């Protein structure tokens, strides 16, 4: 089994196989230019008068200091597998990865928080990210970042920043202030749906048993450039009887359980799309669309391998939801646009820290 909560082990792994100098050179040549380009392009989406990506990442990081790790969802495990597309969405999108076929992906399971050593079972939110590629086609990469909540609590970057401020621990007590949290949600009635989900949510007994949501909406574009607004979710295809029992005292309980499951068989999810009607708001991530909307299963996510994130391929991927294939476009949802810039800023910092060897 792979253990990934020991931060000291990360230092040893980074020095194995290649020298630190070689690793820094690789990062400098490959990662930093990519990060710079992404960061420069995505910042164009952010209003100059709004909260900045740097402010978001500073707040997410807080007092924690884990160089080379993500600022949010810092703890995770790398995945690899195949997306088995059935072509059912081919009439709505020209994206090659939505045509019938099998496409490789690199992915990552994660838990919320800024510490890569956090206990698996304490996190309130879990995530699944994918980078799906059609190796035979250009402009085909699709980066997907999904979380367990189906909606956001707020609809603008400024309100989300205020939410993070309200949830931030007091610098002296290291505890959250319930009065600040209560006041924030009282001033944001749009959070009602999110709070109802939160109050009714019970974490699944496995990462493989959760349903993961796109939260934000996107457009599918067909040959005539007709737009169809969609959201999607990864729905587990799983027999509960095959889930190994969790060790409640193990800080890596979910990761170790995942390793056991993959030794037996691939872990699968159905990728299910919900099609909006004209009256549905595709720009507001706080609002659920009616459950009566048409859904289409686009294919199966088949997870076949796992690797510790410190040595896996997912470590150097920025799972920016604005990296989209031809045939899929972002909506004007301001939260979605802000996610791209924040992801890019976090990636830029991680790459720079790796270059400077701050993990040593």
Image (cartoon, rainbow, N blue to C red):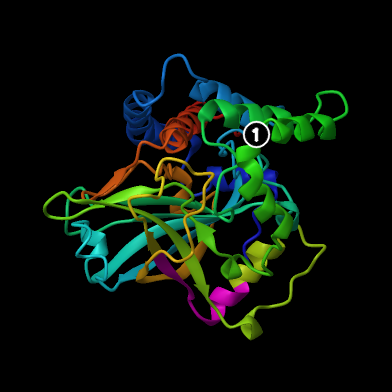
> Does the magenta run of residues contain 6?
no
Residue 306 in view here: yes
Q: Could you tell me residue 241's position as x and y percent?
A: 65, 85
Picture residue at 58% right of the left edge, 32% below the top: 160
- Magenta residues (range): 260-272
Q: Tag 1: Cα neighbours inside 10 Å, few (<14), some, or many (≥20)?
A: some
Q: Which residue is mark 1?
A: 188
Q: Is residue 188 left or right of residue 89?
A: right
Image-based side of 26 in relation to 127, left or right: left
Specify the quadrant of the image occupied by residue 359: top right
What kind of element bears circle 1?
A: loop
Q: Residue furthest right?
A: 173
Most extreme residue toward the front is 279
Q: Check residue 271 for magenta coloring.
A: yes
Confirm whether residue 112 shows in the render.
Answer: no
Q: Residue at x 71, y 56 (%)?
A: 120
């Amino acid at each position: 089994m792979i253990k990934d909560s020991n931060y000291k082990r990360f230092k040893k792994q980074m020095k194995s196989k290649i020298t630190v100098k070689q690793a820094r050179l690789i990062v400098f040549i490959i990662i930093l230019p990519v990060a710079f380009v992404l960061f420069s392009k995505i910042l164009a989406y952010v209003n100059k008068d709004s909260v900045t990506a740097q402010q978001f990442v500073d707040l997410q990081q807080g007092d924690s200091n884990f160089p080379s790790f993500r600022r949010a969802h810092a703890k995770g495990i790398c995945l690899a597998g195949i997306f088995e597309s059935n072509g059912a969405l081919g009439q709505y999108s020209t994206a090659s990865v939505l045509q019938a076929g099998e496409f490789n992906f690199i992915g990552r399971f994660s838990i919320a928080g800024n510490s890569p050593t956090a206990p698996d079972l304490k996190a309130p939110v879990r995530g699944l990210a994918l980078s799906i590629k059609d190796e035979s086609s250009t402009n085909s990469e699709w980066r997907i970042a999904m979380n367990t909540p189906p909606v956001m609590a707020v609809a603008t970057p400024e309100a989300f920043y205020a939410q993070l401020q309200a949830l931030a621990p007091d610098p002296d007590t290291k505890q959250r202030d319930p009065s600040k949290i209560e006041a924030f949600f009282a001033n944001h009635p749009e959070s009602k749906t999110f709070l109802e989900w939160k109050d009714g949510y019970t974490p699944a007994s496995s990462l493989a048993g959760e349903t993961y949501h796109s939260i934000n909406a996107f457009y599918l574009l067909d040959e005539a450039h007709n737009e169809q607004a969609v959201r999607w979710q990864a729905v587990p295809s799983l027999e509960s009887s095959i889930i190994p029992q969790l060790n409640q005292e193990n800080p890596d309980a979910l990761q170790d359980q995942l390793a056991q499951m993959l030794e037996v068989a691939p872990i699968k999810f159905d990728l299910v799309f919900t099609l909006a009607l004209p009256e549905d708001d595709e720009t507001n991530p706080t609002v659920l669309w009616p459950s009566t909307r048409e859904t289409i299963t686009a294919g199966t996510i088949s997870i076949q391998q796992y690797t510790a994130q410190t040595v896996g391929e997912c470590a150097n991927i920025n799972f920016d939801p604005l990296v989209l294939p031809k045939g899929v476009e972002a909506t004007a949802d301001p939260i979605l646009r802000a996610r791209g810039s924040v992801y890019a800023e976090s990636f830029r910092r991680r790459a720079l820290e790796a270059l400077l060897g701050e993990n040593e």
